[in-house]
Image (cartoon, rainbow, N blue to C red):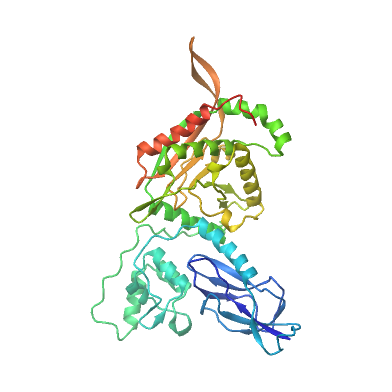
Amino acid sequence: MAQLELILPKMGESVAEATITTWLKNEGDFIEAEESVVEVATDKVDSEVPSPVSGKLIKIISNVNDVAQVGEAIAIIETEGADASTSSNEVVSTPVEEVAAKIETQVTAAAETVAPPAIHEPISKTSNGRFYSPLVRSMAKEEGINQTELDGIPGSGKDGRVTKKDVLTYLEGGRVAAASSKVEATPSAPVSTPAPAPQKATTAPSITPSAGDEIIEMDRMRKLIADHMVNSVKTSPHVTSFVEADMTKVVLWRNKVKNSFFDKHGEKITFTPIIMEAIVKAIQDFPMINVSVDGSNIIKHSAINLGMAAALPSGNLIVPVVKNADQLSLLGLTKAVNDLAGRARNNALKPDEISGGTYTLTNVGTFGNLLGTPIINQPQVAIMAAGAIVKKPAVVETPEGDLIAVRHKMFLSHSYDHRVVDGALGGKFVKRVADYLESWDLNREI
C-alpha cells in the first residue's frame, strides 16, 4: 500500500488559498482517478478538486470551512501497490500538474467571464480574533460591507466563524436589524453604538412566488454572468451609438463564393469573420478603442484580440477570443471563428482561448434581432452588436439620379465606456466599420 497526499492545486495566478466547502467523499470511501473529492471556494469561483489516483480516502486533513493554502495537503489517499523507492508507510506528495491544469481550466474560464468586483474598503483576513474566509471577504466587498459591519455579524460556523449563510441572512434581514441584534447580544459592546450603514439603494426587492410558479436556481455560470453584467454597468458609464450599414455587396459576394469557398478550404464562411475583419481595420484606424482602464491609467493594447460572444446549449454565454486577429487573413479568421464556436458548443475550449480579449463582437442577428445595446465585457471599453441583415427599400445615388432599390441592411450597435471613449470616437469607430463593409470588393478572390 502507498499513501499519497491530495494537494490543493493552483487555481489561478492570484489565488493563494481556498476554503473547504463540501467533502464529496467520506473517510473510508473508495475514489476513482479523476473523480471529484471536495468542493472549494475562492474569491473568484467555486470549484471541485479531483483525485489524481484511484484509492481509498483514509484521512481528511482540512475540514469544512477550513482555509487551505495552495500546495498544502488536504487529505490522504491510500492506493494499491508501491514502487521500489516508496515504503508502504511513507507519505509522498503526488505531482499535481494534471489536477492543477483541470482546476485552472475551470477557474480561468469562470474568472474571464466575470470581471473583478468593484473596489471597496479592504476586508482583513482576521479582525477582533475572528477569521474570515476568502468567500466571505469577497461577498463583503461585493455588497459594500465594511470591516466594522462585518465584525458585527453573528457567526454560526466553527468557533463563531462567519459563513456565507450568515452574510446572506444578514443582508436579507436588512443589515440594520442584524447589526443591532449583535450589539444587544454582546454585553461588552461599547456604549456608543455607531450609526448603522444605510440600506443599499440597489438591493432588489424580495419576491414571493405565486401558486404554480417554478423556482429555478441559477447554475454557477449564470451567477457569474449575472455578477459580471452588474459589475460592468456599475464600472462603466455606457453610451451606445448606432449605424445602419448597407451589406448588399457583402451579401452578394458571399452568395457567389460560399460554395467554392467550402470546396476549396472545407470551411463555411459566415458573416461573423467578415464583420470581424472590418472591426480589425477600424481598430487600426482608431487604436484608442483597443484599450483598458486601470485606475487613472489607460492601457493601450498592442495586440488586437477579438472576443466573439457565443450562446451555449445551456442558455449561458461564453466569449472565446481570436488572438492577434490583425495578423489573420479572412480565411484565417473564418477558420478561427468556426473552430472556437464549435468547441464552445461542446465545452471544449482551453483556458487561454477565453482570456485576453481587447474588443468584443456579439451577433444578435443570429436570433433575428435588428439591433441591441450590449453590455461591455470588462475590462474592455467597447463592444459591438451586429443585427440581422434584412432587405429594405432604400435610396441609391447614381450618376443618373436617385433611385429606390432593394438593399440588404444591417444595424451596428456600438456600446462604449464614456470614461475614456467619447461620442466622437465611439461614433466614428462604428461608422468606419460600416464604411469598410459597404466598400466590399465584389471581385475579391478567395
Q: Residue furthest top?
A: 400
Q: Which residue of the protein is positioned furthest toward the bottom in this rendering?
A: 89
Which of the image's four quarters has the N terminus? bottom right
- Give the residue at x 49% y 72%: 16
Q: Tell me if residue 320 comes above or below residue 194 in the rendering.
A: above
- Could you tell me if residue 210 is visible in this image? no
Q: Is residue 162 above or below residue 310?
A: below
Nearer to us in this view, 290 or 134: 290
The quadrant where residue 101 appears:
bottom right
Q: Pick whichever, 273 or 326, lies toward us.
A: 326
Task: Compare residues 64 and 271 and report the one nearer the observer.
Answer: 271
User: Which image quadrant: the C terminus?
Assistant: top right
In front of the other: 278 or 311:
278
Q: Position of residue 365 (x, y in %)?
A: 56, 37
Q: Residue furthest right?
A: 81
Residue ranking furthest to the left: 192
The mark total stands at 0
Residue 335 locus on image (x, y percent): 64, 43
At a point 55% along the width and 23% down the height, the residue shown is 407
Q: Position of residue 90 (x, y in %)?
A: 67, 88
